[in-house]
Amino acid sequence: MMKKYFNILILLVFLSCEDNGDTEKNCNLYEDRGSLVSSKRTFQYSKESIASLAKTFYGIDESSLNIENGIDVYSVVYKSIGPDDKPVELSGAIYVPVLDDGKAIPTLSIGHYTNTEQYSVPSVSPTTGPQGILGSMQGYFSIYADGYGFGVSDTQPSFVNKKVSAETRIDLLKASKEFACENDIELNDQLFTTGYSAGGYNTMAFHQYIDEKYPEFTITANAPLAGPYSTMNMGKTIFEKGIYHQPYYLGFALWGYINGTGDSDALNRWVNEPYIEPIKTMYDGSKGATLINNALNDTISVLLKKSFLDGFLGDGEQTFKQYLKDQSFIYDGWTPKAPIHFMHGKDDTTVFHYLMEEAATVLKSNGATQIQTTSFEGNHNGAASACMIESLNWFNTFKE
């Protein structure tokens, strides 16, 4: 009799363990880099509030937008590495479209424009990530990295550094897979990527690294917007012109070089005395672009030493020149397979318009067959909205 009851008990236990829909999922897809540390919903936007903030924050009229759904925004923390390959925790935001149909949705990875303030980032304030909102309101699972040195990362940023730009976003891409799993969000295999200004730069880094180092991912389409695709040639143009109205870019790029190479004496060798201290102290995450610009000088020969400028524009500074070439996208023979649509403002004197045409020409000569360019009226700020809206319109032609 006891044996009979024991067998019945075993049968009941077995039946209770069968798949009844309550089996716990294992969403720990990555053990270290790319693993999700935490996530928290921070903002919710209805379709009506999206229209209002687009007008208020971005100056975009509702009539030019295709607002299909509301958005839930989550602040996330994930594991990554810094320029020294040491483990770090980074933050970002995930903009989740609020949908009813349960359809699998594409991922849109976005690179942040130039920013010097540690907490002026999407994980803290989602409106600082306009492309996250514009993408998610059209059904894209939009992921937006704060960047190394921003958000929870309390360290010196590495501006226009190809490796850091790429790895920061690739690790968020991985973490977003865990997030989607945990929140029962079904993603399809499409992966779009874009970004404006410095975001245009690091969307190219993201694309190149995925092509060359991460075969588990495939780019569907890439829209780099107004980016410095050759930091070498951009620097040369600035130094030749002699006047540059955004000198904070130069100090920021110098910090990127110092962090990328460990050459801490570069400041003393290249920068004139009155401006060494501002560059040393003002890129600490608490100062905005205007404040830093006011502390520097837009006359290049006043800001930088003559010996440095003569060397750079002549046959000297070969180490620095090689570093800049290594951070660019026109010297290493990369042939992207996915379609790329460059967009840029015709009158851009911050990140020069010719950099778009140059990058497109070189990639075509490397064998890329799906490269196109579009120029819009306006300068660096004035063309931004048009570029962002048109990039989404273009993505929608591929969207499943």
Image (tube, rainbow, N blue to C red):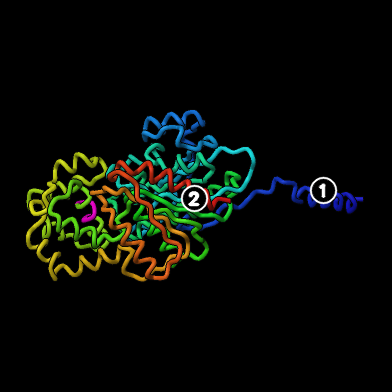
x then y, percent, for residue 399: 55, 50
Please, what is the three-letter code of the amino acid marked with disc 2?
A: Phe
**From the viewer's perspective, is 327 left or right of 101?**
left
- For marks 2 and 1 on the same chain, the one whose residue lies earlier in the sequence: 1
User: Residue at label 2?
Assistant: 395
Residues shaded magenta: 251-255
Residue 351 has which mark? none
Q: Is residue 167 visible?
A: no
- Closer to us: 145 or 175: 145
Q: How many callouts does the rendering have? A: 2
Above or below, comparing residue 26 to residue 39 in the picture? below
Residues packed near mark 2 inside 10 Å, few (<14), some (14 to 19) or many (20 plus): some
Classified by dominant secondary structure, the portion drawn in magenta counts as helix
Membership of 180 in magenta stretch:
no
Residues packed near mark 1 inside 10 Å, few (<14), some (14 to 19) or many (20 plus): few
Membership of 252 in magenta stretch:
yes
- Closer to us: 110 or 16: 110
x then y, percent, for residue 264: 18, 59
Residue 12 has which mark? 1
The image quarter in which residue 122 lies: top left
